[in-house]
Amino acid sequence: MSEPYFNNIKTELLRADLKTNLKITRSALGDTADLNIINITIGNTECAILSIEGMASSQLLAELVFEPLTSYAEKEPTANQIIEMLEKHSLMSTDRQLVTDFGTLIELLFSGFAAILLDSIPRAICLGIQGFEKRTVSIPEAEQTISGARDSFTETLRTNMSLVRRRLKTPALQFELCKVGKLSVTDICIAHIEGRASTETINKIMQKLQSIELDTVLNAGYLMPFLDETYNRSIFSALTVTERPDNACAALNEGKILVIIDGSPGCILLPTVFADNFRTMDDYCEKPFYAAFSRWIKYASFLLAVLLPGLYTALVMFHPEVFPLKLLLNLAAAEVATPYPPVVEMLLLMVLFEIMREAGVRLPRSVGGAVSIVGGLIIGDAAVKSGMVSQPLLIVVGMTATASFVLPSLYPAITVLRLIFIIAGGFGGLYGIAVASALLIFNIAAVDQYGTAFTSPLLPLRPHGLKDIFSRAGFRELAKRHTTVTDD
């Protein structure tokens, strides 16, 4: 691939000649159609106002740039007087930058700035008058809320930063900006609370972001392989992606770090532990006893979603003596009427379930739910009546599917683990289930993210952190002792 012309001139300084500056800028942008150049003469000085169509607000451009310049033109100032007015005596925009090179000039233009260039002046004044289309703050879509806040992150970086700042009005909350992506030049923000997040971890994350050599960064998924140190050797993700500002602020309070990506409503939280998947902000809106009950339900749902299909297959094929006699006779009669062994039936139904779920997700929302439900009922009923699968097995699949929806953040891992346990139980019985369980525990225990164990606070044991894992600590107790992910 040929080297873009822009890469050759992005470090060059602006010239004193206006026509030369405009010629180089046009060439660097490839004479793109969305580059707007408006020439104006103020006194005896030729000026040019540059902007990108759709990125800068036309109304703000007229009110904050054109009107002051045209009114100032009546005084017939010199070029030095104009640049002094723009730099020292004007209030055209709160976001104003003085630019001396073409690289920064073009980056600001694509970020919604308007640039003012003057003849005989080798620098430009860039004013932030962004006016690109953006989605308003709406309710969370992926993370449903019952009693918590109803707002969610959007695709605009500055809006997301303000949603966090509005909840944490403290100077300890700090934001650091960087750019990632050779072509997209995506703005990335790292948020943390000073004194609670590890300084070493912050520096390490910043170094990893700056070393990324991707051409484009369009959402959180592009960064996860670089930020997750165990991305290729763990079935679970050691990072959490959230769209809820209240969840992000709670994590910041625990000493975690928030990575906000411009153009993506999903923000990354790290480091996270396995138990974070079983906690929600709604738990802190209920009484501790009910929150504890809800968390135990989540743990039970995880075990059901992962183990139940494989355990059923293992017991039916290798250990039928564990069933009561009446139930055993019913299961035997159901399995005799089907042509395939239970392990094949289970794998077939799980694959069909995933196909219907994927169809329901990808179709338009108005028909997606109806298609998945109707498809499940028709296919399930027809499969049982035709004798392809047994009815008890269909019940197990339904219970498993329902349990897996309780933990949406773990759904990808649960889907893969479920198939592994079905194969292990179908070919090894309870012995195969035990071996697969041991390997799963080893995989979870081996994850260590930025010095924080994925099994914390169980391993290594932190007694003061256990109260907010299997139960919910009261706010009076939390006020007396605040814990973070880095506490020993």
Image (cartoon, helix red, strand yellow):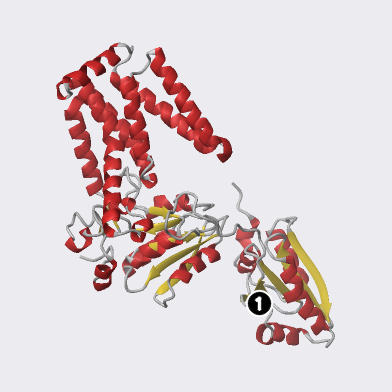
Residue 393 picture quarter? top left
Give the residue at the far left of this rendering.
321
Residue 5 picture quarter? bottom right
Residue 272 picture quarter? bottom left
**Vertical placement of 181 versus 195: above or below?**
above
Is residue 210 in sight in this rendering?
no
Helix, strand or loop at label 1? It is loop
**Vertical placement of 485 versus 327: above or below?**
below
From the viewer's side, name the closer residue of 235 and 109: 235
Q: Quadrant of the C terminus?
A: bottom left
From the viewer's side, name the closer residue of 306 and 126: 306
Q: How many marks?
A: 1
Residue 176, image x and y in percent? Answer: 46, 69
Is 393 on the left or on the right of 69, as rendered?
left
Residue 162, image x and y in percent? Answer: 51, 68
Is 345 on the left or on the right of 460, as rendered?
right
- Name which residue type carries label 1: Ser
- Number of other residues with Cα within 10 Å of mark 1, as a class: few under 14, some 14 to 19, many 20 or more: some
Is residue 38 in sight in this rendering?
yes
Query: Which residue is pictured at 71% across the width and 86% down the height?
Result: 85
Is 111 on the left or on the right of 42, as rendered?
left
Residue 467, image x and y in percent? Answer: 22, 60
Query: Which residue is pictured at 65% across the width and 65% down the height?
Result: 112
Residue hosting label 1 = 93
Is 151 on the left or on the right of 110, as rendered?
left
From the viewer's side, name the closer residue of 69 and 130: 130
Residue 314, image x and y in percent? Answer: 22, 25
